[in-house]
Amino acid sequence: MPLRVSHQALFDRTAFQIMQGYDRYTSQQGLVASGKAFLQASDNPTEAVQALQGRQMINVNEQYQKSLTLANGWVTYTDQNLDTVIKGLQDARQKVVQVSNDVTFAPGSQQREASAKAINAILEEMLGYANAQYEGR
């Protein structure tokens, strides 16, 4: 016995299928336009999780690179300052030894006072290097 289907039912089903096709078309068009595999996490939860994990790994690696660059800068800056401090301390030591061994530098003489001022200036400079900042720190 043949089943009778009304024209209205056929029309409704065809219209529904056309609307579904149009919805699929517009969603695919949106994906192509955006260049993304999905627009919302609910479209593809598995790929959404993988994308988030990938982004997190990229952020972690970028932070590692920033930290390495900062640490390298710190080491270079500190090394340069330490070289300068060592040279300054060697100069101060040399002046102290010279003043203590030379008989021309009698206690209270102008030469001895000038050497003491020079040594104090070197020490003040060393304090400046001790309080130096790098990148605002």
Image: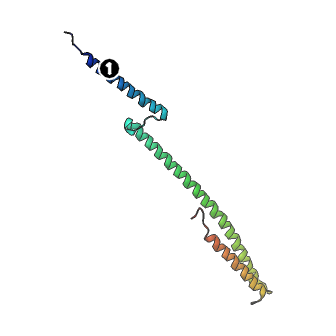
Q: Is residue 74 left or right of residue 42?
A: right
Q: Is residue 66 left or right of residue 39?
A: right
* Residue projecting furthest to the top: 1
Q: Please say if 129 is above or below 44.
A: below
> Which SS class for mark 1?
helix
Q: Which residue is mark 1?
A: 14
Q: Is residue 105 left or right of residue 66?
A: right
Q: Please say if 82 is above or below 54.
A: below
Picture quarter with the N terminus: top left
Q: Is residue 115 left or right of residue 4?
A: right
- From where the camera sits, is residue 96 visible? no
- The answer to which image quadrant residue 44 occupies is top left
Q: Residue 112: where, in percent of width, then height? A: 76, 85
Residue occupying the point 67% across, 76% down:
123
Residue occupying the point 55% across, 53% down:
66
Q: Residue 86: where, in percent of width, then height? A: 68, 70
- From where the camera sits, is residue 16 visible? yes
Q: Amino acid at mark 1?
A: Thr
- The one nearer the camera, 94 or 58, is 58
* Residue projecting furthest to the right: 104
* Residue projecting furthest to the left: 1
- The answer to which image quadrant residue 14 occupies is top left
- The one nearer the camera, 45 or 122, is 45
Residue occupying the point 45% across, 33% down:
31
Q: Please say if 22 is above or below 122.
A: above
